Image (cartoon, coloured by chain):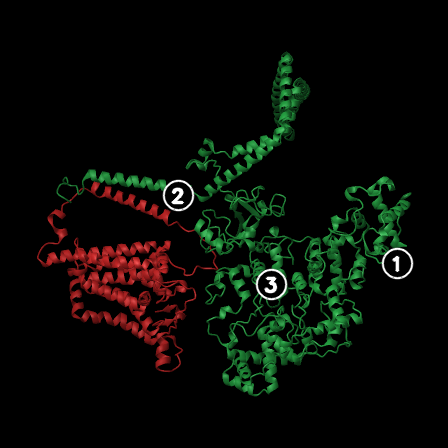
Chain colours: A red, B green
Amino acid sequence: MKEIINWMAEPIRSFPTFAILFFLMLKHYKTVGTKKFAYISLAVFFPAICWFCADPNFIKIILWPDNIPINILIITITFFTWLTLYKCAENDNRIEAGQLPLEALPENREKVWSWPNLVYTELFMIIACTIFLIVWAIIFKAPLEEPANPTWAPNPAKAPWYFLGLQEMLVYFDPWMAGVVLPVIILVGLILIPYIDTNPKGNGYYTFAERKMAITGFMFGWLVLWIYLIIVGTFLRGPNWTFYGPFEFWDFHKVEPMYNVNLSEYFWIKIFNTPMPTSLILREIPGIIITVIYLLMIPPIIGATKFGKKIIEKSGQIRFYIFVMLVLGMTSLPIKMILRWLFDLKYIIALPEWELNL
Amino acid sequence: MSKKNEPGMAYNMSKLNKVFALLSIIFLMSTIWVFLDDYLRPWKLVQIEAMKIKKNKLTKDLKKEVGSIDEASVIKVENDIKEGQSLLEGRQDQLSKADQELRLTLKDIQDETIENGKLNAQISAIGFQQGQAWAHHHKEKSDRLYAKMTTKKNLFAISKNKLKALLVKKKAAKAHLLALNAEVLEGEKTLNELISTRELLKKALAKTKIDPLWTFRNLPFIDFLDPTLKIQQVVMKNITDDRYFQHVAKVDRCTTCHTLINQPGYETEPNPHRTHPRLDLMLGKDSPHPLKSIGCTSCHGGEGQRVHDFNSIAHTPENEKQKAEWIKKYNWHAPHKVPQIMYKKSMSEAGCVKCHSDVEWIPQATVLNEGRKNIEKFGCYGCHKIKGWEHKRKPGPSLLKISSKVSKKFFKSWVWSPKSFNRHAKMPSFFNQDNNKRPDFMNKNIAEVNAIAEFIWSKSKTYKPFMRYTGGNAKKGKELIGTVGCMGCHGVEGFTAQSKKIDAYAGPYLTGTGSKVNADWLVSWLKKPSHFQEDTIMPSFRLSDVEANNITAYLMSLKNRNFEKLSFEKSDKVARDQILLSYFSAFDTVNVAQAKLDKMDDRERVLELGHRSVGKYGCYSCHNIDGFEGRSPIGPELSKVGSKPLTQFGYSHEHDVEHSRDGWIQAHLLNPRRWDNGIDKPFKDLLRMPNFDMTAKEAKSITTALIGQVADYVPVAGLKRLSANEQITEDGMKVVTKFNCIGCHQIDGFRGDILAHFEDDLNEGPPRLVGQGHRIQTDWFYHFLGNVKPIRPSLSVRMPSFNLTNDEKNKIVAGFQAKSNEKVFEDVKTAVVWLPGEKVGAKKLFKSLDCVTCHSGGFNNDEATAPNLHKVSKRLRPSWVRKWLTEPQAILEGTVMPSFWEDGVSTDSEIFGGNAERQIAALTKYVLELGLK
């Protein structure tokens, strides 16, 4: 069983599994968003987790002080995701039945004083958080490690937990892309959301039915592309950034067969059996064409579909194209991951001469 | 959000207040927890425990001291004091008057000092003003100030004089007062002498008391002021820690828990309270390694700065038992992220190497020296470069003339399995090991050994023995081997027990010699080893032809019939060609390699493979082989192996090997091929380190010596640097080690392996050399090393003649001198100068002490049992002769030379009135004169 889980946990299998589970969850959000479902899940997963924890390798990685935040993160994210779906399901059922959403009921629209209702309770939270941090600091003491040695880096060398998603992206992208371009797109995209999304529905109340695409798109990026990568980077990447299953011993000597090939090499050498062109542009032309098609052709094509037309109608051309470009940026990650797993693809465009690898 | 709430309120206020109160209480508690967590440190309890132990000891000491004080005399003295006090009562008037006078005088002195000081300041100030005025040509002002200054100076002189007078008065007054108090003061002084130790102990004991003040000083929050429980540390100027970006002074806080480590008297306490077992050598104030400048982790390893728990320091358990104990007691776990963990207790001598890097043997480091002896024995330095071992000769015999020494068949079988010929062989086993036992590998190995033999034979020069074996008496030969001194370097079959005791290793264990060499070669070798090999360390024992033949007869009678029966398999040509192909195709394609091979004839192929194999197995690292001069040794350098990160040690699948440097090295020494277990490797990549079949004990000692080879930088001031004298000594001792003089001679207590053979009477063995540089004269010693002649007629063991170069002789002579801190020449007069009547006394003394009984040489024809006294003046230094006569046992414990002047008392009270010094001087002169005649 543990071996199956180890095997399943490898990104090549766990990523699609996770993605499928994500879509199933959203599809059946009314089932997931019930208290019954929550209790049943808890009843199933709690013993399972206990059984997991009986494994020395699993418990070791779980209780590693650096990883405690990720445990907390997993628990809170699971709970809040469920809570959202629960509230959405509740409201959507009401809306279907022709009632107002819960938040829109008159008694819930009543106004209260910010002091003490808000400020006082905020103080509580400040105190509670301070207590939590103090106790945490006492129990999981900051370790006293050896003096920093520039010639002897720790292995694995891990980024702070909140950057582990980015570090995991480095496996698939050039540092320029994973470290600079994609994070910038993420930040810019998050900043732009209020300007792109002009749909007033769902303001002030939970709903899924009315905002299907927005929620699906955001949650995919958040849960599947960000949280999932953090979890993999934290728990499943060991020495040499090699993948280790949750029950696997972190053997320093584990070797993974990895030999990555560029698209241009596939194209010229494998398919056409000719020497690589000396001209850089010509050499990388297949990747360039694909990228251009991906970035410049797909948006108009989507815009021409019924779905696209509807969005353009609602929010205008500029918003639509910005939105589509952001979505394409986001989906480039899973696309690249899948290409890597299936074809050992290194770079679509490999121009190390120009520090430009895609 | 129930409707019960007031308008504008989402919550009930009193409920909110309760939550607030609860949170505040929890917050307060967690804050207290922080402080407690910070306050409760494990080492505090340890210090309290140490205090209790100290208290117990002091209480005991005090009790003992109280017991040893003569109470009656204390009471007597106390009574004396009382009597004195009653006397004082009678002098009450005088006393108070004297006291009053002293006080008044003191007051006057104080008054006058003030006046004096004021005047002094004024004079200085006016002097400055006057100088200024004079320099600026304000003559009038200058004159005025000058006059003023002169007045003040006069006043100052008067005041000074007054002060002097007052001081005299004070002295007199004090003396008067003391005289009045004389009886009491005298009594108190006597009392103090009697009880001062007791009082000191009492004071020390008081310091170990836990009283309210002690508690207050150590309270939380208060303890930042002046706690008694605190972290103790030693900061070392001359030893640094490598912090990678810079070196910082080493800081050891070990004494925080090991509080009593440098205080004698706690040797039996449990750790951490135990005294260091060698305070005379380590940590003690007068030891060569005081705590203040050497600290703890400089030698022991570990993280000396850390005190927060038992594990953080990287304590290392000695064995599994201790490990289990520590896990139970201290929740011990293997240290991680520590570059240099603490050495195991039994290996702590490894720490010496870092600073004592210039010497072969480190005095008193018995474990380490044992390890180095074993490195020397197994010749590790032949294949592995080790810093400090570069000057050593190749550990194996030269193969330049091997074809004239042994048969090719013997050679092959020997190389294949040295241990089956001689289980004490130092030559390690390369073949039939864990990783090359497979039939196809064996087949290739056989081809290699055959090729090696052919190659070596093709390079070997011929040699013709200069003597013929003419037959001899094996029994007499055996006897001779046992007595003449062969066993200082060789173990010998037939002397199993003695060989084991002596554990000689410089030469091979002599067994099966008859199956190895031919008699003519052997007899020539025994007569003159340098005839066969010029640079051999085997000396000549100046054997007569009969003796040489007798020994040959015995050694030739030692046969290894089983080994003789072995025949070595013929080389498999296919296997041979396969190996050659793999060599040739290293940088070429298989076709090119094949073409290259095809061009070679059979003989060429064999020689090529032989040449390659000698290189592959590194035969040339230990043996001189023609054509391999100047090749670097085959093994990796071990100079810094003690700092090699653990992750760089290849454990392969050997998970039962301890995860530590010493664990790996030990496992490696015991079975170097184990790392290939379960790994699929081509023939050419198999591990090649041979198996020495060493014992676990030997492996451990070598490991200790090796893990001391660290990369740590020690500032020059922290290193043990040899003085000029010590350097000369070391150079000399290196030659002494090379020729294995220490196999026979014990030098200032070090080694003298063969003495184990003479346990019953050490005087029967080779002379122990104590202060040898002081004992003998330089030119005689130099001459002697080149022309050895027997000195002690009674000894059957012989000082052999070594084939020493002039440089080596000089080094030995200078080395011994420097070791004894002696000058090159002592003033040796050509003629002895006698005091009046001295010579007559000396003669009488010589007769009465009956020196001739033992030192008969040159006096009569009796068999001499002691050195010839006529040669003393040439050989010995006069000052040493005097010292020797005074107390022979002090120089050579157990010597048969009698002590005639034990404790400075002469046995002959008539001559010179029994004055020992004069007697010894006279006798020395007499003995010296014997040789001068």
Q: Are labels 3 and 1 assigned to the same chain?
A: yes
Q: Of circles 1 and 2, which is in front? A: 1
- Residue B766 or B470: which is nearer the viewer? B470
Q: Chain of mark 2?
A: B
Q: Of circles 3 and 1, which is in front? A: 1
For this view, does B462 lie left or right of residue A81? right
Local crowd size for mark 2, using a 10 Å CA cut-off: few (<14), some (14–19), many (≥20): few
Tag of residue B861? 1
For this view, does B783 lie left or right of residue B287? right
- Circle 2 is placed at which residue position? B37
The answer to which quarter of the image holds residue B461 is: bottom right
- Circle 3 is placed at which residue position? B386
Please report contact status of discs 2 and 3: CB closer than 8 Å, yes or no.
no
Instruction: Find residue B85 and report its horizontal and vertical position in percent.
Output: 62, 17
Residue B230 seen in the figure: no
State how far apart marks 3 and 1 are (Cα).
56 Å
Residue at the farthest front position: B475
Instruction: Find residue B779 and report its horizontal and vertical position in percent.
Output: 81, 58
Is B121 situated above or below B286?
above
